[in-house]
Amino acid sequence: MAKYEVQWSKRYYASGRAVIEAESKEKAKEIAEERIGDYEGSMQYDADGDDIYILGEKLTKCCGELGMGCGYEGNVEDMTKHPKYDGYLCPKCTKETS
Ligand SMILES: [Zn+2]
């Protein structure tokens, strides 16, 4: 099985209530807007905010000849596709094979 590097992010939001003394509704809203940075409400997890991005395939093992690898494990980008087998070769084994 291959290994993939995945970048993720998830979103939380906070909500709550406050009582504000003001001359009007509009003024109360203004005051709330000023204070919102200091408000601590209850945290809610927003599943719609989940974001997952596959960065690439990572850490594959050198397969060497006939699947007998040298044990080297590296990023797929640094490996070479084996000319005969379904696998990858590390930089060292690439030189020996060619
Ligand atoms: Zn190797």
Image (spheres, rainbow, N blue to C red):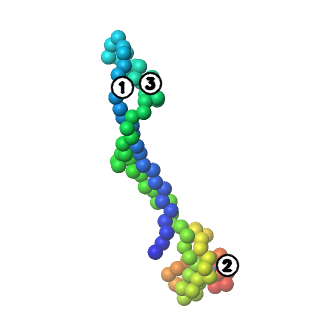
> To which residue does mark 3 refer?
35
Label 3 vs 1, first from the N-terminus: 1
Q: In front: 72, or 65?
A: 72
**The furthest residue to the left:** 25
What amino acid does circle 2 point to? Lys
Mark identifier at residue 48: none
> To which residue does mark 2 refer?
92
In this rendering, which labeled residue sits more in front, label 2 or label 3?
Answer: 3
* Image coordinates for residue 30, horizontal then vertical, percent: 40, 19
| Ligand 1, image quadrant it occupies | bottom right
Q: In front: 55, or 48?
A: 48
**The furthest residue to the top:** 23
Label 2 vs 3, first from the N-terminus: 3
Q: Residues within 10 Å of mark 2 (few under 14, many from 20)?
A: few
> To which residue does mark 1 refer?
18
Q: Do the residues labelled 3 and 1 touch (CB within 8 Å)?
A: yes
Gap in angstroms between the C-alphas marked 3 and 1: 10 Å
Residue drawn at x 36%, y 19% is: 20
State the image quarter where residue 16 is shown.
top left
